Image: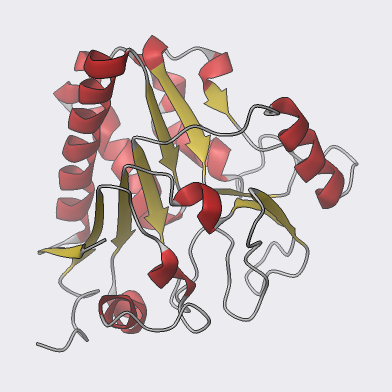
Amino acid sequence: MFRRLEVLPTRSAVEDRVAAELATAVKSAVASRGRADIVVTGGTVGIGTLAALAQSPLVTEIEWTRVHVWWGDERFVAAGHADRNEQQARDALFSGIAIPASNLHTFPSNHGQTVCDARDEFLAEHVDGFPNFDVVLSGIGPDGHTASLFPGLPHGEGEDVIAVANSPKPPAERLSFTFDVLNRGERVWIVASGADKSAAVARIVADAPQSETPATALRGVKETVVWVDADAASQISS
């Protein structure tokens, strides 16, 4: 699937544009099939996009009771911990809108079980599997990782969810969807900002090997878009 690059001048411009595109995609899915399923991400731009949507008039045009939210990955820490992507997303958007709690499909928090037990707990709650998402929003790290799929670590081929025990970025324990699940998205959008992401963005655009830059494995069913600011695009060869 062709990967499209969209460069905007600033991080806030990326967040505003992606927030508007997300609202449009969600409304379209609700109108066509009565439900929308989206995957959200942590990180500066991922959370910033949710905050931008919260401040946009478009937020009131969405039937949130028909929207189901999933997380691409999660830090395995206690519920309410500031490091949890879920908590950051709630603070940015979901605590301020009328979305049913049952529509937020969060990964388990650490309440004394092992990270592998938490993975099994999540899979047991979703024995029917996972939907074909309308939008998958994914951030990247300077090393080219996405979700909690890191260079040099297993990516869970053939699995839906993996338990990560040795993330090179703290916290060490995480839960993550695999590419088998993330690539079920009709639209997969990669978001990044800042010069520290520029080398990884250049490798993604150049389609570097997945072993070197895992985010190159992200592929949407209908479209794959890389949304970046000018700093993040600064190392792309013309």
Determine which quarter of the picture holds residue 26.
top left
The image shows residue 161, relative to residue 101, as above or below, that is: below
The image shows residue 124, relative to residue 15, as above or below, that is: above
Quadrant that contains the C terminus = bottom left
- Number of callouts in the render? 0
Quadrant that contains the N terminus = bottom left
The image shows residue 181, relative to residue 95, as above or below, that is: below
Is 33 on the left-hand or right-hand side of 101? Answer: left
Give residue 177's position: percent from left, percent from top: 58, 50
Tell me if I can see residue 233 in this picture: yes
Give residue 141's position: percent from left, percent from top: 45, 70
Viewer-proximal residue among 76 and 159: 159
Q: Residue at left 47%, top 29%?
A: 69
Is 96 on the left-hand or right-hand side of 178? Answer: left
Is 60 on the left-hand or right-hand side of 126? Answer: left
Determine which quarter of the picture holds residue 2.
bottom left
Viewer-proximal residue among 141 and 187: 187
Give residue 219's position: percent from left, percent from top: 36, 58
